[in-house]
Each structure stands twice: as C-alpha cells, then as structure tokens.
Image (cartoon, helix red, strand yellow):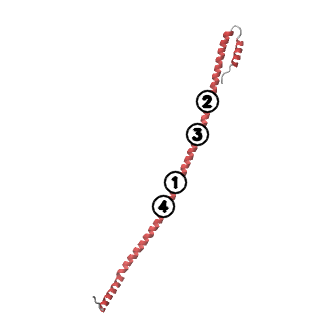
Amino acid sequence: MISLSWPQLLIELISVLLLFAFLRAKAFPPIVKAMRDRQERIRSDLETAEARRKEAEAMKAALEAEVRSVRERADQVLARAKKDAEDQARAILEEAQRESKRILAEAEVEIRRQREEVLSSLRAQIVEISLSVAEKILRERLDSQADRRLVDEFVERIEVPQ
C-alpha cells in the first residue's frame, strides 16, 4: 500500500497547482485562442457556404426563369412561322385557283372562237359544194342570182350541231 505523508501530499498538491497555474498562464491561452480562432473560422466558412448556397439557388432560379422565357419565345416564333407558312400556302393556293380559272376561261374563249371559225369554214364549204351541185343541176334553167338565193335558203335550213 502506498502511504502518503501530509507534507509529501502538500508538496505534490502545490506542484500540481503550480503546474496548473503555469499551464493556465502559458499553455492554455494559445490553445484557447487557437480553438476560438478555429471556431470563428468554421463559423465564417459556414456563413460563406450558406451565402454561396443562397447565391447559387438564386442563380439557378434566374437561369430556370431565363430558360422558360427562351422556350416561350421559341414557341412564339415557331407558332408565328407556322401561321405565316399556312397563310403563304393559302395565298399560293388561292392564286393557283385564280390562275386556273383564268386559264380555263381563256381556253373556253379560244375553243368558242375556233369552233366559230370551223363552223364558218364548214358553212363556206357547204355553200361551195351546194353551189357546185346546184350549178350542175340547174345550169340551164336558173341564173346566178337565183342560184345564190336557193343556196342561202338551203344553208339556212341546215342545222350545224353546236
């Protein structure tokens, strides 16, 4: 068993108290200061990180809003382009329809003109043939004026299909 005497215990107690006082005077202040500095640096880093996180969130929100805005503008441009294309297609179709009607009308006029020319030519040929036939048949009995009158009457009675 360990036996301690009071004087020895008192010396050891004084030694511990002196050691504690020395440590408190010389070693603890730098340690406490280092711990406070570290604590302050950690708090500052946390505050900086929080500020950067908030800044990043704000940037993210702004970028998302910008992306939405760009998408909306792109949709508007596409819708406008689609409408313009549809309008242009409609205008081209209408112009083509007007042009085809004009061409058809011109063709109908040309067909009527050519038909009239053919009919007129046909009538002239019929008159010539009729005159030749009539001339041969009636050569001795009729004169030229009477022949012409008979042929005109004959042509008027002939119906040419329309």
Left or right of 60? Residue 123 is right
Please give the residue where the numbered disc 1 appears in the rendered image.
71
The image quadrant where one finds the N terminus is bottom left
Which residue is located at x 39 percent, y 76 percent? 35
Q: Amino acid at mark 3?
A: Leu
Q: Which corner quadrant of the image does residue 25 belong to?
A: bottom left
Real-space Cα separation, disc 1 to disc 3, in angstroms: 32 Å
Which of the marked residues, 1 or 4, is nearer the chain's N terminus?
4
Q: How far apart in space, not on screen, are marks 1 and 4 (Cα)?
A: 16 Å
The tag on residue 93 is: 3
Q: Earlier in the sequence, mark 3 or mark 2?
A: 3
Which corner quadrant holds the C terminus? top right
- Gap in angstroms between the C-alphas marked 1 and 2: 53 Å
Q: SS class of the residue under badge 4?
A: helix
Check disc 4 and report the residue beneath it: 60
Mark 3 or mark 4: name the one nearer the start of the chain. Answer: 4
Of labels 1 and 2, earlier in sequence is 1
Secondary structure, mark 2, is helix
Q: Residue drawn 33% across and 88% down?
A: 13
